[in-house]
Amino acid sequence: MGTAAFVSGATGFIAQHIIKQLLEKGYSVVGSVRNESKGETLKKNFATDKFSYEIVEDLETVGAFDTALKKHPEVTIFLHTASPVTFDVEDNEKDIILPAINGTVNVLKAIKATAPQVNKVVITSSVASQRTFSNPSALVSEDTWNDITYEQAKSDSVAAYYGSKTFAEKAAIEFVKNEEPHFTISTVHPVFVFGPQAFDSEAKGELNVTNTFISGLLKLKEGSDASVPTNSGTFIDVRDVAAAHLIEIEKPSNGLRVLVKNVDFNSQSLLNIINKNFPELGLIKGDPEAPVDKKRITDAKSRAYLGVNYIDIEKSVVDTVKQYVAANKLG
Ligand code: NAP
């Protein structure tokens, strides 16, 4: 029957690619979703009996995952991806920080209490837990930790996201130290994730937050007084992020906080790729020669561990734009 994996937050941009790759490799997958209609959409899209879903309405409810896990004694691997990725909230602590921390703890408690057969847990963390809040230009690596305090994290929604990923990961480490569970925990730390949705139908309308950095550029029409946003960061394609999760579940855990990153970008460099490949969209040119700032991130240990060649940024942006333009009938 093959190995079965549980994926929390199955509706997510990254999670859908993880599930797709798991199914392609012969795993059975149980995904958690917040309601039935989201589950049914996924079932229709994955179109296989090897995918099923369980409803977990709220990450924060005590015992949230217990019932779902008890129903699936076949599950031996748990991938915890669910966490708020949103910056437009009313309450930074309540809407971003606490669901991330409590969701992680609830997952780990549920596995300890109800799923003795689960031997591996992979948590989707982020480079946000490896960056230094007090010094954004400090070198980032697999070994660095964000020094953000709880008070600082509450101050704005971006800080709250950084804090949420940092505190959730620390809570997982604390859990292992105190509870000595029967499973190992490892973490995957993507940088800024772009790339197509797992299904073309999901590219209609508003995209997940990180891809709006690309879709937002498609509104900058030539002849308008639009200017190029100042966003910048380091990129990785979603298909590489999903593949890193699969490598992580198939290799013995070695304690490496796997940092998944490709090249640096800014809005201008993304715009240059779009203008080169989609001149018919008639977007502003900006300053095509403007340089991309180099971010100080090293991922040497992770590259050696994963042993992969990443999808380049041009292909990632082209695949994203092509899918978005077709789904939304732009052009
Ligand atoms: P996404 O598309 O927004 O997916 C987030 C998932 O978490 C969705 O399934 C969402 O459910 C679920 N979720 C969020 N808040 C929840 C809550 N309070 N209760 C229950 N479920 C909740 O984001 P993504 O980009 O795929 O991110 C997935 C994971 O990767 C997150 O842990 C994120 O921190 C991490 N990550 C993302 C990036 C990036 O650039 N995208 C980079 C580094 C790390 P609904 O669909 O029902 O809202």
Image (spheres, rainbow, N blue to C red):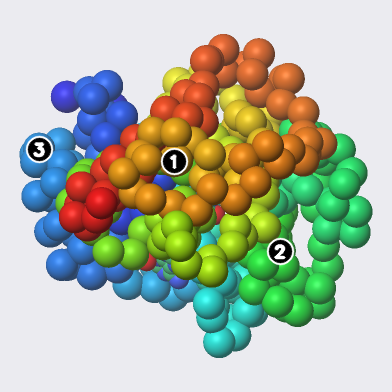
Dot 3 amino acid type: Thr
Report if the beta carbon of the residue with label 1 is closer than 8 angstroms to ligand 1: no
Q: Secondary structure at mark 2?
A: helix
- Total count of labels: 3
Dot 1 amino acid type: Ile
Q: In this figure, which residue is indicated by the disc labeled 3?
A: 48
Q: Nearer the viewer, residue 84 or 217?
A: 217
Q: Nearer the viewer, residue 128 or 121?
A: 128
| Disc on the earlier residue, 2 or 3 | 3
Query: How far, Cα to Cα, is label 2 from label 1?
Result: 33 Å
Q: In this figure, which residue is indicated by the disc labeled 2?
A: 163
Q: Position of residue 236 (x, y in %)?
A: 54, 35
Q: State the residue at coordinates (65%, 46%).
A: 287
> Mark 2 near mark 1, Cβ–Cβ under 8 Å?
no
Q: Secondary structure at mark 3?
A: loop
Dot 2 amino acid type: Gly
- Name, please, the residue furthest toward the bottom: 90
Is residue 184 depicted above or below 304 in this figure? below
Q: Is residue 133 left or right of residue 266?
A: right
Q: In this figure, which residue is indicated by the disc labeled 1?
A: 274
Q: Nearer the viewer, residue 159 or 320?
A: 320
User: Few, some or many C-alpha atoms within 10 Å of disc 3 (few <14, some 14-19, many ≥20)?
Assistant: few
Q: Position of residue 310 (x, y in %)?
A: 51, 21
Query: How far, Cα to Cα, is label 2 from label 3?
Result: 37 Å
Q: State the residue at coordinates (37%, 40%).
A: 279
Q: Secondary structure at mark 1?
A: helix
Residue 265 placement: quadrant: top right
